Amino acid sequence: MSADAEKPIPRATYRVQLRAEFGFDRTAEIADYMARLGVSHLYASPYMKARPGSTHGYDIVDHNALNPELGDANAFHGMVEALRRNGLGQVLDFVPNHMGVGGSDNGWWLHVLEWGPDSPYAGYFDIEWEPDRRYLQGKVLVPLLGDQYGAVLESGALELRFDNDTGGFAVWAYGTHKLPVRPVDYGTVLGTDHPDLERIGDGFLHLDYVRPHQIRRAESLKAELAALVTEKPDVAEAVRRRLKRFQGEPGELDSWSRLNELIAQQNWRAAYFKVAADDINYRRFFNINELAGLRMEEPELFDVSHRFVLSLVDNGTLDGIRIDHIDGLFDPKGYCARLTRSASRPFYLVVEKILARHERLREDWPIDGTTGYEFANLLGGLYVDPNTEEAFTRLYGDFTGRRESFEEVVRMSKIRIMESEMSSELHVLARQASRIARCNPRTADFTANILHQALKETIARFPVYRTYVDWNGLTDLDRRDIDWAISQARRSEQGPDASVYDFLHRLLTGDLVAEPHSGYSRQQVLRFAMKLQQYSGPVMAKGLEDTAFYRYNRLAALNEVGGHPEHFGVSVSAFHRANQDRAARWPHAMLGTTTHDTKRGEDTRARLYALSEMPEEWERQIQTWSRLLRARRGDVEGTAPPDRNDEYLFYQLILGAWPAELTGVEPSNLDPQALADFAERIAGAMTKSMREAKVHTTWAAPNETYESAMTGFVHDALDAARSTAFFDAFLPFQARVAKLGMLNGLSQALLKLTSPGVPDIYQGCELWNFSLVDPDNRRPVDYAERRRLLDEVEGADIAGLLGRWQDGAVKLALTRRILALRADKAALFRDGAYEPLDAAGTRAEHVVAFARTLDDDAVVVAAPRLVGALGEAPDWGDTSVPLPRGQRWRNVLTGEELEAEGAITAAALFQGFPVALLVREG
């Protein structure tokens, strides 16, 4: 039996975002619903212990404990049993790259702050203990203050406290963030006022005498101190008096001198959060100070942090693992190999990986594929008309005044990130590179500053998130991408002398140590190349996804995670080639259309795709809407904020996310509360978009004036009580686009659920999902409504549900029937071949069709695309789709029996329902 045959490959997954309001118990309650829907596995968001109040679970503080906010061990086991009773397995989203820090919950991090480099956990985190900043030698920068350090100290927001239970001292920031005091400083805190405190304090002062056992000795002394405070009121009072000596008067900085002097001695430096960009000396998840990177390449850390998750694999609780942010790891391939070796049985393994258009997933990784970002964008491209790209580019430029190419927007966005939020990490890399350069006289004059410039220009032009140089060197694919980045950087007018790029090229490829006696250290060179890879990925992510995607708004549906907004549309043949390639190389990769990370839900995008078919009409509409709304605000010239680019995005968001229940409603009948709720969602999404774009406002320095202008614009536009003129113009167009979006949405769902791979349904997306960027896409899901509709659509005439498409029942019925077929023909969908079926005839370009075949079994899938050109009652003319061998077919969606051999007309295929799924009956 092959390894894949033994491996529990999911048939289809259902993603659930666990949170305090929807934990293990609530997930157990929907196990029967998921089973009835037809999936085989729950796909759970991270449920290891996270920071209190976490809404997503990615800020883990203990990999070996359950998150208590989701329920206790009994609740967890109850969920597992409920899944098993309903025949469901489980895939877990696991986070190996980073941990949540700050607060008072991460024991490893607190120990590092307490003991510095002496902590046994110091090597778990990616900390530079000897930075060039002298004041950070042996310290960790902790950028958690909301103002300058002196201002926070003077305000009294930093307070020295004693823990009666542990006997430990810590400085608390804002009463939330715990910063442990070095035990060697306890003597200073305890003083000599009380004989017991003097004696114990002396023990703390001389901990160096008991090295290497100082940590164990300190814990004994703390326990003794805690016992004395508990047992002796006079000792407790003496400790309280000593703490008061470290208090001052708010507003009088000099009165806080004792506390300031104590803080200066610690293994940490508390700082204003904005200092992080320049001085931070630990690797973060992107630029998030509260998420500290882990050195998962260290075997001891790997073993410790994977103990619990591997036990769940070994005992059968988990059939699969999804690895979050694989590109953040030092050695992704090595990590995946170690993970698969460490389990006692085969398991399904997918990785969160974003691929460039020219990039292939590395076939030597022991995984089953990616989580499906590339599929979502491949599929969505089918509904974008490539013939209108020029018109769309022109109208976007005319409306907004923005003429830059997307490539230039990305380059400038990446440079912005490297010069602001992630500048400290680049300085560290430049210093490391200069140290390597000094090892050989030929390169000794390449200073940190020169290398900083060259690195910045090179990383800004990297065509992929990262390369995968490892201890064995690099592949031809890596060399190709490094060659490209270096060659493009050489052309920069702002860059350094070209000779530095020769050195940098040899450094990044490892060629520096290809010859013996070079003077360079192989360890240093390859480690540098691998560390740079950990930096280039976050720079691409922050520059592309979290900046450029919010600046370049030509067609927002294309600005999706893993997407390529400069690429306008995907041909049917390209779709087939990608599916054939996946069937051959990664047949069990995950297929997603909405995730917790997508910037717009699948059906929001499905509507916006339709705009590509009507550029002239779209341009007329936005010009009309703009005139109406700006005139209402007294801005006849159209020059007041928001700027035209933000305004242009706003129109796309309201068109894509407009509630289905408000579609087709007359302006006078719009529900004011529903409109107000929608306006709040749009205002939230626009605020996030503007801050991510970093043009008029940012997260670090919000421009309240500009943001207020934008949110005021949103609320004015969506206030039917003021005037219905805007709605009179907007609603008819919205209804038309919504209908096209509905057809795109059904087509999209069919193709995802039948293409090679493991389809995932993001929570609630069995009905329409018109969500916006998070946290909007994590809104609660109404499972009572879904249960009711599932009962209703069982056995219902699916075509009859089209007349009430707004409630989503038609999408639910489609999903249910396809998943039932996947269950009935599990082997065919898991292992079957993929055969493109090229339509012929006058409307051939509007059809995408393929067959899934295994031995004598066959399933035919057919769906329309670019439906705007087809009209309300499509005339398919002579368009036909070839069929595999067979004469009698049944449409699984409608129950219709068809007789056709060799080919079937599109008119017959789509006569009863907009999409078709045929099974061979004979």
Image (tube, rainbow, N blue to C red):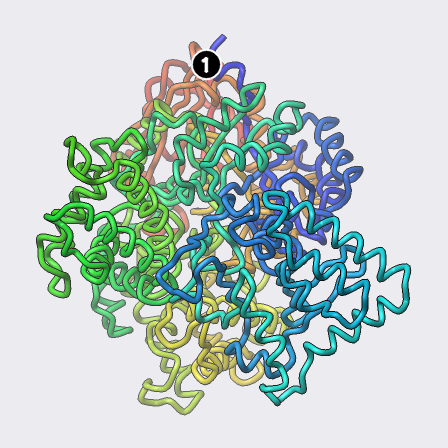
- Left or right of 150, for residue 355: left
Disc tally is 1
**Three-letter code, disc 1:** Asp
The vertical placement of 331 against 669, above or below, is: above
Give the camera-side residue of 631 and 481.
481
Q: Position of residue 705 (x, y in %)?
A: 45, 85
The residue under label 1 is 857
- Left or right of 700, for residue 112: right
Q: Position of residue 106 (x, y in %)?
A: 63, 52
Q: Position of residue 529 (x, y in %)?
A: 28, 43
The vertical placement of 323 against 293, above or below, is: above
Q: Residue at x 22, y 62 (%)?
A: 449
Tag 1, which secondary structure?
A: strand
Q: Residue at x 42, y 41 (%)?
A: 329
Residue 755: quarter of image: top left
Outermost top residue? 1
Residue 554: quarter of image: bottom left
Q: Position of residue 617 (x, y in %)?
A: 31, 65
Q: Residue at x 51, y 50 (%)?
A: 117
- Left or right of 642, for residue 723: right
Give the camera-side residue of 748 and 212.
212
Q: Residue at x 75, y 59 (%)?
A: 200
The vertical placement of 22 against 145, above or below, is: above
| Residue 441 visible in the snapshot | yes
Outermost bottom residue? 634
Q: Residues within 10 Å of mark 1 (few under 14, many from 20)?
A: some
Residue 820: quarter of image: top right
| Residue 556 visible in the snapshot | no
- Left or right of 832, for residue 124: right
